[in-house]
Amino acid sequence: MHLDRRQILRAGAAGMFGLSAGNAWAAEQKSGIRPRAKSVIFLFQWGGPSHVDMFDRKPNAPADVRGPLGATQSSLPGSPVCELLPEMAKRMHQVTQIRSLTHTMKNHNSAGYYALTGHAPPRDDQRLRDSIELFPAYGSVVDHLAPGSGDIPSFVSYPHVIRDGSITPGQHASFLGKRHDPLFFREDPNQAGFRLPELSLPAGLTVDRLSRRRELQQLIDQQTRLLEYAEPAQGFDEYYSRALTMLTSDRVRKAFDLSAEPDAVRERYGRTSYGQSCLLARRLVEAEVKFINVYFSDTIGGRKIDSGGWDTHGFDDTRMFEIVDKYHLPVTDQTLPTLLDDLRERGLLETTLVVWVGEFGRTPKINKNASRDHWPQCYTALLAGGGVKEGYIHGASDAHAMYPDEHPVKPDDLAATMHYLLGIDPASEIVDRNNRPLVIAGKPILEVIA
């Protein structure tokens, strides 16, 4: 939600402080489902982490399935994890593991769209491009059906636009309209002096001046015709009105002020973009944001050992285990346990659902280049807090972690579970641009709910 001076002026056309969000609690109660979570933190592991190397270990499998990384026993009996995840090993009794996620999309953009929306794309095609025909992001559906109230956005996403060549669909509101787009930013929370230009007034423009609507009317009128006739602009009026409300909100500015955190807390999360993004997610939960997308990386990765996503069969496949050893697993083992601990210590985990998942896993059998390829047929997600069980494993993979052995779960069903825990009926319908009613998700996994 990037604002320049003209966009701020345009916002007045919809009412300076009119945030018509509705009452979330009433919407949830209307569904007849008791909300267990107030917020969702969706930690999206772009690139596809290896389930068989991390959480779905197979100690009795052949060496070319087990891989070179050792395993360590976790706090959940019978559930070993990678030896490079010692902190997560201590906390596995606190999370739910879904070990039987499955679909058939082998390309990043198609699988990524499926993971970000809970709706299968029309085809498995790396050239799948963003389109108004495709389904909206989870947070946009939440903002449409059960928005928060007041000046806090319902949906925030950061700090990347993810892509593999073209931009991956499923990161915004699509046919629901721009009014339901996330508050999105690319600024790195780990940068010194992190701030959001979107939440700062342009030089020389004060709140008092913004409030003088008569003075602004002439400028606003010049933009009216564009807003009325340009289809891409539909929803801009409410979109900018909400943006302006956030711009003038002390609550919003304080939520994004990472400088208010003690240095010890920031170090605890890790001085990485991902670590500080997760710390910011905790602050947004405290501010009552309902859905938060945190993207691990903007690229699928595989070309560096100190940045990028989980697609570790890059330009030099033999470096896969060097990348996860030196970067992915250390960052994960510092940040994810810290986020769970911090939420618990602050009394927030009970009402905050944390979801850790990628778009697929990796081939259980190591290939001839000492690497693992894309594998959507079976992979793992972690859930914690927000009404799910602790120390629970749902589903199982076969002896080599290749296919679900029991209770297969589709991304549609994971989506339904998130909505259900927020108090939203997964059978709810939204209407696309052709006025077709579309069910928002699959069937909730009731077995994981405490």
Image: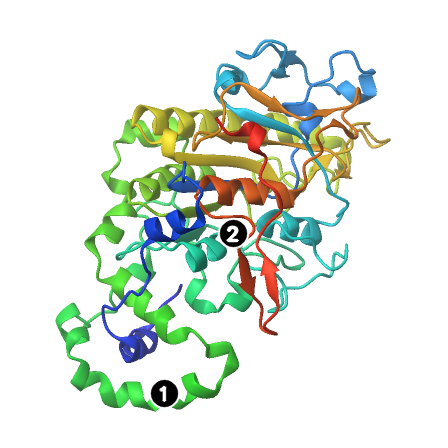
Q: Amino acid at mark 1?
A: Thr
Which one is earlier in the sequence, the residue at label 1 or at label 2?
Answer: 2
**Which residue does the numbered mark 1 point to in the structure image?**
224
Q: Is residue 89 above or below residue 339?
A: above
Q: Is residue 360 left or right of residue 256?
A: right
Residue located 36% across and 75% down the image: 237
Residue 412: percent from left, percent from top: 63, 46
Q: Nearer the viewer, residue 239 or 424?
A: 424
Q: Residues within 10 Å of mark 2 (few under 14, many from 20)?
A: many
Q: Is residue 201 left or right of residue 160?
A: left
Residue located 51% across and 36% down the image: 355
Residue 288: percent from left, percent from top: 31, 45
**Which residue does the numbered mark 2 point to in the structure image?**
138
| Quarter where residue 164 is shown | bottom right
| Quarter where residue 218 is shown | bottom left
| Label annotation for residue 339 | none
